[in-house]
Each structure stands twice: as structure tokens, then as C-alpha cells.
Image (spheres, rainbow, N blue to C red):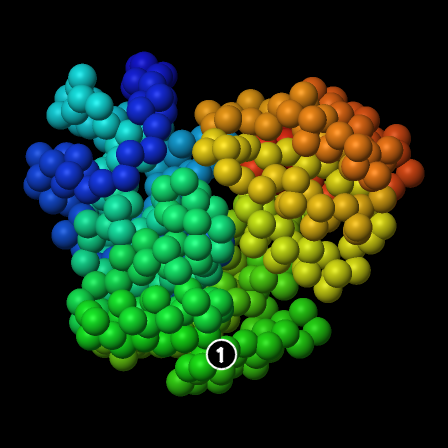
């Protein structure tokens, strides 16, 4: 029965990306506006949304709140997008939610993301969450999630991604992301370029929203693998279960947001609960290291230029060289600078494998890679594999003890499943 409704949902992938709020508002009205029944935190940004959301979810949960978490995309199963207190929605609960959405939208041209967003809002309302952490899908202003009235908004980073829809300059992209800021509700702002920051702060000023800016009002520093935070409070030697140099920035955003929730009298921060929460954050495929078969496999879902640069800095920080790189990408809109992304990692990689994979989005094929890289001097150290299984088998007998696997999150999901199937890891 569940497969019938999953197939129905998946058919809405063909409706593509259609920015706008009219359809989601219509659906939510039919459901009696479940998104207005509990407090929320709203996040937008090119990178860091998922990790920051996961950190916040853990913090709220450890402080005793029944916490909903809505993120996208998923790595393995749709259930991962809808979590309460670190547990995915069950198949039985998912079936019930899909049945309801099927009945009220049957035959209408609604996007996949609009349906999953409505499902998240309904599920959290039905389960009576105390708060929900909601991640935008793309942009902000016209994103299907932008119907909530959050306690506060967070803008993590702003870089070039989805430029077909969000604009070709950082200022235009920032305008779309800043669309989640609500009148008189505070906004926590990450490390942005001057151009992007000006747009965000101007929007906050117009809406009379207090703004808290990274490295102006709060910040963080790394100290031998631990983190020292400063803001309204100071915390020394924080241990975060998520690795990667870029996670310090995400941690700072989450901690500043908690401080502001305390200022709003939503909660009282307890340092012991805070430290416990940070040690138990779960978020897959972000600088994830697996030790198996005499090798270190490092998996990171860096799927745009900014993410790749953050990954590169973390690799240097961890001295993760020399390594063999397995890379694959999607390019749904045809505007992603995939060659430039690869070039960021080429100087660090001793050998490179480019791969295809199965995805609901448009995958960069091996034929396309060969055309893109034609006449490149580094082509001699590049090989091509048809799928993740072929790629993983090909490196098992390689002399390299360090393997970096990165690119599309859908690719990372397939790699993790394939590795488990062929016995590389549990």
C-alpha cells in the first residue's frame, strides 16, 4: 500500500521546480493550517542549512522539547525528511499522511516539494511537537516553507546555486534568501560576502527585525578539534559530533539562535544539556569518515562551489592527503559550474574517478564529463566508472589509503547503500 502512494508522490517530480506560495497555501488551508499550530525556526542558505538544523534539533531535544525537523533531500528513504526527536517518521505514519494528501490534491499539478512540505507541517501538528526546525528547499521568498511565522530566521551562507531561479548575482540570491525574514522577528546571519550581507541587513531593517551577524555579534574558534564560542555567553572546549572545519560556523549559528530563543523566553539554556546535545548530533554524509578494508573513506555532500571550497579547506585542515577522489554531480538547471568545482579539488587529488549514478535529477554523464574535460592536462589521472559499485570495487586494490567521495547528495546516498551491499561497511 505504501508503495502505491510513494509512486504517486514520485510522479510529482515531473512537475519540476515551480516557485510560488499559492499552491501550498491552498493545500494547507484544506488541512486547517497545521503549520500555525506550533513555534518554528526557519533556515535558508546555500550551504549549512542541514547541519545547522540538525544541531538545533539536538539542542532543543536535549532541553526537553518535542522537536520536529524537516530537511531535504533524503539520502536513502523519504522518511528521513521528517524527524521528531531524532527519529524518522515510521512507514505507518508516512502512509497515513500520504493518504490524506492524496485525497485532497488528487489530479492537481503540485510539486513534489510542496507535497512533502505539507506532509511535514501536518505530521508535526498531528504529533503535537513543541517546536519545529524547518529548512527551505531552494531560495526562501517563494519557497513552499515560507508560510510559517517563525520565532526567528537563520540565513547560513549565500553562494551561487540554482541561479536559473534565484538570480546570477550574490545580491539577487541574497534578496531571495532574505525573503524568509519576518517583520519584528529576529534573524541570525552567517558569514556572508559584503554584497549579500548588505541586502540581508537592509531587508531586516525594513522589517524592523533585529539582526545578529557572524563575527560581529557572535563567533567561534577551533582549538585542537574542539570549539570556543563567544556571543552573549561564552563556551570553551565544546565537542561536536560533526567533523569538518565548516561545522564550526554552523555550530555558532545554532548557539546564537539558542541564545535568542532564551531572550524570547522560549527556553532556559542549560550548559550540561547543551554540551550533551552537541556530542550526539546525527547528520549523514557531511565529512563522514568510515574506516574499513584498510582505508579511510571520507564522504561529504559538497554539491556546489561554496560547499566544495569549504570541503577543500577541511581537507587541508585535517591533512587528508594524498587521496583518491571519486566525484559525481547533478546539473538539473544546466548552470552549475561542475568543471570549476572539480578544479578546486584536482590539485589535492592524486587520482580521480568520475562516476554516474541514479537520481531524480539530471546527472552529469560520463560522455558529458569527457567533453567538458577534453584537452585538460590533468585528464591522464582521471578514469571513468559507470556506477558507484564499479567505482568502489576499482579502488579496493588501489595503493591509496584515503578515499574522498563527494558531489551530489543523491550520489552519496547511493554510495552508502552500495558500500553496505558489497560489504565495505555496515
| Residue 392 in sight here | no
Between 402 and 302, the residue placed more toward the observer is: 302
Q: On the picture, is 409 further left or further right than 421?
A: left
Q: On the picture, is 12 further left or further right than 397?
A: left
Counting from the top left corner in percent of width and height, residue 295 is at: 81, 42
Q: Which residue is mark 1?
A: 215
| Residue 139 in sight here | yes
Circle 1 packing at 10 Å, graded few (<14), some (14-19), many (20+), is some
Establish if 379 lies above or below 311.
Answer: above
Establish if 359 lies above or below 127.
Answer: above
Q: On the picture, is 289 further left or further right than 59?
A: right
Counting from the top left corner in percent of width and height, residue 181 is at: 26, 63
Q: State the quadrant of the N terminus.
A: top left
Counting from the top left corner in percent of width and height, residue 224 is at: 70, 73
- Residue occupying the point 29% across, 34% down: 18
- Residue occupying the point 79% across, 32% down: 375
Between 107 and 260, the residue placed more toward the observer is: 107
Secondary structure at numbered mark 1? loop
Counting from the top left corner in percent of width and height, residue 387 is at: 67, 22
Amino acid at each position: 500500500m505504501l508503495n502505491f502512494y510513494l509512486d504517486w508522490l514520485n510522479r510529482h517530480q515531473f512537475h519540476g521546480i515551480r516557485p510560488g506560495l499559492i499552491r501550498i497555501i491552498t493545500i494547507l488551508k484544506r488541512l486547517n493550517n497545521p503549520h500555525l499550530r506550533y513555534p518554528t525556526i526557519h533556515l535558508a542558505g546555500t550551504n549549512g542549512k542541514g547541519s545547522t538544523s540538525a544541531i538545533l534539533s539536538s539542542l532543543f531535544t536535549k532541553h526537553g522539547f518535542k522537536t520536529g525537523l524537516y530537511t531535504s533531500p533524503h539520502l536513502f528513504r523519504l522518511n528521513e525528511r521528517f524527524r521528531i526527536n531524532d527519529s524518522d517518521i515510521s512507514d505507518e505514519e508516512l502512509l497515513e499522511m500520504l493518504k490524506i494528501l492524496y485525497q485532497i490534491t488528487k489530479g492537481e499539478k503540485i510539486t513534489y516539494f510542496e507535497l512533502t512540505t505539507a506532509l511535514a507541517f501536518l505530521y508535526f501538528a498531528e504529533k503535537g511537537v513543541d517546536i519545529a526546525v524547518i529548512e527551505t528547499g531552494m531560495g526562501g521568498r517563494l519557497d513552499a516553507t515560507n508560510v510559517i511565522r517563525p520565532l526567528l530566521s537563520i540565513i547560513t551562507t549565500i553562494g551561487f546555486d540554482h541561479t536559473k531561479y534565484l538570480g546570477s548575482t550574490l545580491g539577487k540570491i541574497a534578496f531571495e534568501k532574505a525573503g524568509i525574514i519576518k517583520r519584528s522577528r529576529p534573524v541570525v546571519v552567517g558569514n556572508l560576502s559584503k554584497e549579500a550581507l548588505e541586502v540581508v541587513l537592509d531587508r531586516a531593517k525594513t522589517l524592523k527585525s533585529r539582526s545578529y551577524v557572524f563575527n560581529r555579534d557572535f563567533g567561534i574558534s577551533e582549538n585542537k578539534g574542539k570549539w570556543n564560542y563567544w556571543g552573549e555567553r561564552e563556551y570553551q572546549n565544546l565537542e561536536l559530533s560533526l567533523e569538518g572545519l565548516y561545522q564550526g560556523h554552523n555550530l555558532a549559528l545554532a548557539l546564537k539562535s539558542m541564545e535568542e530563543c532564551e531572550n524570547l523566553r522560549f527556553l532556559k539554556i542549560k550548559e550540561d544539556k547543551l554540551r550533551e546535545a552537541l556530542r550526539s548530533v546525527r547528520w549523514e554524509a557531511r565529512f563522514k569518515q568510515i574506516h574499513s578494508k584498510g582505508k579511510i573513506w571520507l564522504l561529504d555532500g559538497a554539491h556546489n562551489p561554496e560547499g566544495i571550497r569549504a570541503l577543500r579547506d577541511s581537507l587541508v585542515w585535517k591533512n587528508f592527503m594524498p587521496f583518491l577522489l571519486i566525484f559525481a554531480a547533478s546539473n538539473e538547471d544546466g548552470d552549475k559550474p561542475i568543471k570549476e568545482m572539480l578544479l578546486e579539488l584536482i590539485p589535492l587529488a592524486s587520482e580521480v574517478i568520475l562516476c554516474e549514478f541514479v537520481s531524480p535529477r539530471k546527472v552529469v554523464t560520463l560522455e558529458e564529463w569527457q567533453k567538458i574535460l577534453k584537452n585538460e592536462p590533468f585528464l591522464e589521472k582521471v578514469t571513468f566508472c559507470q556506477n558507484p559499485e564499479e567505482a568502489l570495487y576499482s579502488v579496493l586494490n588501489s595503493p591509496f589509503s584515503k578515499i574522498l567521495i563527494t558531489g551530489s547528495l543523491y550520489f552519496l546516498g547511493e554510495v552508502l547503500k552500495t558500500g553496505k551491499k558489497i560489504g565495505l561497511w555496515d
